[in-house]
Image (spheres, rainbow, N blue to C red):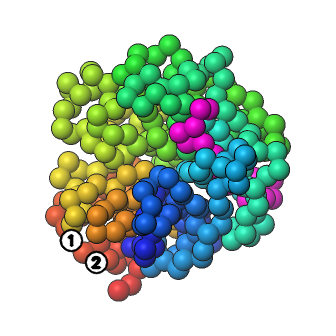
Amino acid sequence: MLRHEGNHLGDTWYYVEGDICHCYYLTCPESVPRHTDWEIAHATSRDMVHWELQGTVLRKGDAGEWDANGISTGSVIRYKGIYWMAYTGQWNGPVGMVGLASSKDLYHWEKCSYNPVTCPDDHYYAMNGAGVRTFSHWRDPYLFTDGDYAYHLTCATRKGGRPDACGTAGLARSRDMEHWELLRPMEIEAVCQEMECPQIHLIDGHYVLLFSCYGLLFSDEYVRKYGRRLRQTSYYMISDSMFGPYRFCREWKLLPDDFEDPDRNVQYANQLVEKGGRWYLLGTVWSEQGDYIPDPLVYEMKNGALRLIDERENASGRNYLEKLEDVGIITV
């Protein structure tokens, strides 16, 4: 379990190199409200259970700079011999913006001088949300590569979409990480107002689009269909192609309906992480008893759907260290 004593924890993202999992996470002192003064910190682990804090790696910009309003969620890749971190510069500002930092070792990061690199334009995207939260949605950049290009997804707003289902994944690409071309949104089933922390993973021949959403931000159709089963957590869609179309499959939930931590919270902004040939789910629990990143959950692709291994044992509160030992991940 990852905690940062005296601090709130926000969204996390991960990069695995060798046997080390690098976690980058949003944090700010508990003396200020969440979301108002985030910095990006770093922790490392070999088993994703025991973490070593490495300190702050990025701070928000000075007054007048593009990211002075506060920095937020991002991702990390290695591209053309350099580590790159994309991050959100104005998550609730007049116009959402994405910038980059680079590193040679994953521990020391430097913001790029040419930031920001992308923001929405009205050719493909609505400049503001049309649902409950009407500020500009262009955040949570997720980096990935395909061929010669580096791409990033963002939480974005569909142009001309229904107000209750206008959430989509924005798309941009670059060959040099400085000059970016905005592309039309991913082809995604319209189900909600916001698709936070979108990610793409190829798992056993299936492309998985993972995203997070609040229950009240799903479309009227889905609220009528699923009611209380829609809650503040993460969901996924499946496609045969990297760029879609993505649709909910029959087993569209990542966590069982009765899965919650001892404080009766459900983890949010979940990320799928591949390590040693296995897939793990890690997310954030916001708790009045202190925020934390729970121990990882193990997933597999079975019959075209993601399945939590030994779902009933996990949901019933079994010590997850015992579960990790059972599947040979760690020894306790």
The answer to whether any part of residue 288 appears in the image is: yes
Q: Is residue 221 above or below residue 117?
A: above
- Decide: few, some or many residues near mark 2? Use Cα within 10 Å; few <14, some 14-19, many ≥20: few
Q: Amino acid at mark 2?
A: Glu
Answer whether labels 2 and 1 touch (C-beta < 8 Å).
yes
State the residue position of label 2: 322
> Is residue 18 shown left or right of residue 237?
right
- Can you name the residue that lies furthest to the bottom here? 332
State the residue position of label 1: 318
- Can you name the residue that lies furthest to the front here? 63
Instruction: Please tell me the numbered disc located at residue 142.
Output: none
Residue 143 falls inside the magenta stretch = no
Residue drawn at (21%, 32%) of the image: 226
Check the picture and name the quadrant holding the N terminus. Answer: bottom left
Which residue is nearer to you in this view: 134 or 238? 134
Residue drawn at (66%, 16%) of the image: 123
